[in-house]
Amino acid sequence: MGKVSLFILFSIIPLLTLFWPRVSVYIGPALDSHAPFESTFIIKNEGNFPIYNLQYDLKLNDVKIRGVRFNNSTAGTPVAIMHLFQNESTTILINNLLKTNVPVDYAEIHIDITFKYFLIDIKNHFRFKMAKNISNEFFWLPYFNP
């Protein structure tokens, strides 16, 4: 491989990272630390250009209530956000995923995000799992498959 080929290769990679969209989902503040579904998540455009036709879909999966596990996914309705500019974010409240007075032992939330970047349709998938500390306060953690 010649010097010109290496120069082109090492020039394209930084350009791709400069122009490629980066959308992240962060765990936001809990409105009530004893009610796991009174939490927020934040979608943020960390890329250098705006994204358009952004939609997110929340899914509740692998719920455990009083020792009984429900593996079926409960899908929400996709919610449209018109656009997010560079470093702009929006907050998601997840309290309509599950309405119950019974304590939830465990749950997972899947957040699917789709958006248009120039003419390319892009889909990202984020997973979070519920945990609680020794004070029985709930919080969410990013969840990755092993």
Image (spheres, helix red, strand yellow):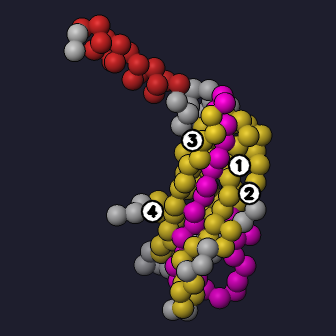
Give coordinates of residue 55: x percent, y percent: 71, 48
Is 112 one of the magenta-colored residues? Answer: yes
Q: On the picture, is 20 further left or further right than 42?
A: left
Numbered disc 2: secondary structure = loop
Work out whether 145 lies above or below 82: below
Q: Which residue is mark 1?
A: 55
Residue topped by disc 4: 143
Residue type, mark 1 in image: Gln
Q: Secondary structure at mark 4?
A: loop
**Residue 80, position as x, y percentages in the image:** 77, 49
The crowding category of the residue bearing disc 4, from other C-alpha atoms within 10 Å (few below 14, some 14 to 19, many at least 20), is: some
- Tag 2 residue: 78
Q: Is residue 13 visible in this depiction of the protein?
A: yes
Report the span colored magenta: 94-119
In whole angstroms, how far apart are the C-alphas of marks 2 and 3? 17 Å
| Residue that badge 3 annotates | 23
Residues at marks 4 and 2, CA–CA distance in whole angstroms: 21 Å
